[in-house]
Image: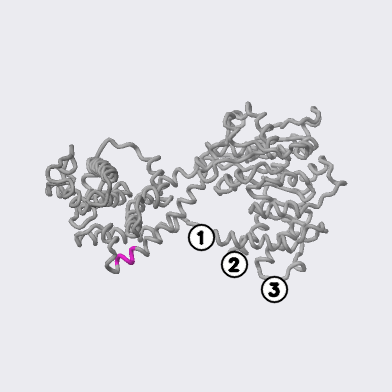
Amino acid sequence: MIRTQLLHSGLELANFAVSLDVLHDAWTAIWDLYTEISQNERPSSAVIPKVCELPNCTIIVFFTWPANSKDRVQGNGGGDFVLSSELKGSSPNFDFICTKCNPSFCINEHAFELFESIFPLLPFLKSKIGSFKPLIITGNSLGGSVASLFTISLLETLKFSSTKRPFCITFGSPLIGDEGLQKAISSYQAWNSCFLHVVSDQDPVPRVLINGYKPFGTFLLCSELGCSCFENPQTILELLMAAYSGSPENQDPNKVFESYGTLVEHLNRKVLCKDATDHESLIDWTKGPLRAGIITQLAAIGLMQLQQPPNVDINIIITKIESVAKSEAILNSCFVNPIRGLNEIKVYMAYFEWYKKNCKEKGVGYYDAYKDSNNISDIEAESIKRSLTTYWNELVDQEEKRPRTVGASHRTNSLFGGTNYRRMIEPLDIANYYNAGKQDYINKGRSKHYINLEQLLKEMEKPSSGPNEIKRQNMVSSLTKDSCFWAHVEEALISCKVLSSKGSSVEEKNSAKEELFEFEKYVLDLMKNYAVSPEIFLPRSSFMKWWGKYRDIMGTSYSSSLTNWLKNDNNYKAYAKGCLDIP
């Protein structure tokens, strides 16, 4: 049912778009510029920009001569790419749209060359961005490609919270980038929604650059029968080719260009007069509402009435679109909404706070209680832990897909929750890991989402010169700062076992001893900064087990800063109260 509404919204969105003044204003600005320059200039391959100030908006137009654009796109090498790595010397270079999951992309070479030609004008054009009047960026054919690239260049520094979002409307524009560019834009909805590409069923230019190219934004596919909006990249590629009704006789670039004005007015009139074509005879309702919705959309763009070429099967196209729609519905249902899930996550974390406190009252830290798993609460903790891990795994995965300049506020807001989760839950994963008889958790067993959450903290955390009073006062309930602390403890226990084993070689024992010396330094540094929870000193904790074994191995004559401190039991209580200074 959700997907049916989504598919029908394509028709509703299209009707909404063509009924607005913005579509008419964008085309009028292009046509006025064309009329102006055609009287004074001969056709050229250059892109011509102009700023139009209207009472209700500012429009930046990028015009290219229809015939030259068509020849340039369709000519030899028209589909050549330029790699994002080759753009690093230019300004802007679009590096900001890359993500860790999507580090590179390609842009059509001709489109970028045209965009590069207006670089000197970019400061002037960007100065027209205001916080009150909407900004419309538009262009025809390759001018539309430049409009898209100009809009992308704005996204790096634009603050959507204080500045109105730019809206890019292209008419008959060819595709401009590969899958990398498509993912970079589409992965962030606030960016993807900035683009509306109007494509007539008579225009060949948007259909030339297909192989290796991927669309982004919303496509308004139009015919004389009507129009509909589509957003799925694979669906758009299928329909660009299938819904083309042009022929050699009507491919005059100037006539196709002029037809957009007529088409916009025609569709606007149809919507205002509610003159919708009756598609009921084309729909087999026994196939379900999802398929009926798809057929209605295809009929609106004229596809159902076309005489299809032998290699085009309309039923196969409908089935493909249906399959994509179902897949999207599943993905959307699995999508993590941080706000929606926040209350549930808080409840889960509150449970672990209780679990931690309950374990401490029994004289054992929650790490060791969970590791032993002797009662029902430990089993329940495992179930809740899985729910928390699923949530943060998906949230971190979504964060990885965001462009580098996007989501700073989200990162700040989620930092506290993600850090608390990592420090509370990762020790439990460590317990499971070593219970399974494994070793070297940090290098071989650590989940990527913990690594990413930790890196996020490092990027945003201010350096600390030492413990402050707040840290000292909150020691009783604090979590150990390093969520891998218990992995270090387990490795130290393994090293003690190597040292005490008669079967260990001299080389193995020397290596184990070096590792234990490093562990001493590691623990002491944490304690100096009050960065380790006092519950590690509970008599039944794995850390105290390590200390007992280490003390026996090294003997009473061994002396170090940490061991001297651990030999005095009074230091444990003083540390827990935050009133102990460790030199």
Choose mark 1 or mark 2, whichever is in front: 1
Measuring from the top left, give residue 365's x and y in whole percent: 24, 57
Q: Are marks 1 and 2 in contact (CB under 8 Å)?
A: no
Residue placed most toward the observer, 217 or 432: 432
Looking at this rendering, what residue extends furthest in the bottom direction?
286
C-alpha gap between disc 1 and disc 2: 16 Å
| Pointer 2 residue | 1
Q: Mark 2 or mark 1, which is nearer the start of the sequence?
A: 2
| Residue 268 shows in the view | no
| Pointer 3 residue | 286
| Pointer 1 residue | 334
Pick the quarter of the image with the N terminus: bottom right
Measuring from the top left, give residue 542's x and y in whole percent: 24, 55
Type of amino acid under label 1: Cys
Measuring from the top left, give residue 568's x and y in whole percent: 12, 46
Specify the principal SS of the magenta part: helix
